[in-house]
Amino acid sequence: MAREELARLEAQAPRAEKDLMIEMLPPDPSDSRGVIMEIRPGPAARRPALFAADLFRMYSHYAETAAGG
């Protein structure tokens, strides 16, 4: 059982090392700052407005999930 566990843990080691290195990076000072984004449709018919609406929903959903709320 110990050999099986050792093999499993050795296979996970590279991923764990990579995750650890990422966690050791210093925090970015910009991470706590807010963002203001303007999304406007281009000058044309209906398609750019639909794209802008989809883009707004996508960014709104991301902001809600990234903020935990």
Image: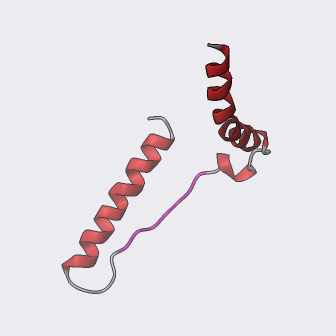
Q: Percent x, y for residue 2? A: 67, 14
- Judging from the image, the colouring scheme is secondary structure
Q: Quadrant of residue 16?
A: top right
Which residue shows up at 74% across the image and 50% down it?
A: 28
**Does 63 appear above or below 3?**
below
**Does 60 appear above or below 3?**
below
Q: Assess whether residue 21 is covered by the magenta stretch.
A: no
Q: Percent x, y for residue 34? A: 59, 52
**Does 43 appear above or below 33?**
below
In the rendered view, does 9 fall on the left or right side of 26? left
Q: Quadrant of residue 53?
A: bottom left
User: Foreground residue, 17 or 32?
Assistant: 17
Residue at the outermost top position: 1
Residue at the outermost left position: 46
Count of picture labels: 0
**What range is drawn magenta here?**
34-40
Q: Main secondary structure of the magenta part?
A: loop
Q: Percent x, y for residue 69? A: 44, 35
Q: Quadrant of residue 50?
A: bottom left
Residue at the outermost bottom position: 44
Q: Percent x, y for residue 60? A: 39, 52
The quarter of the picture where the N terminus appears is: top right
Which residue shows up at 48% across the image and 35% down it?
A: 68
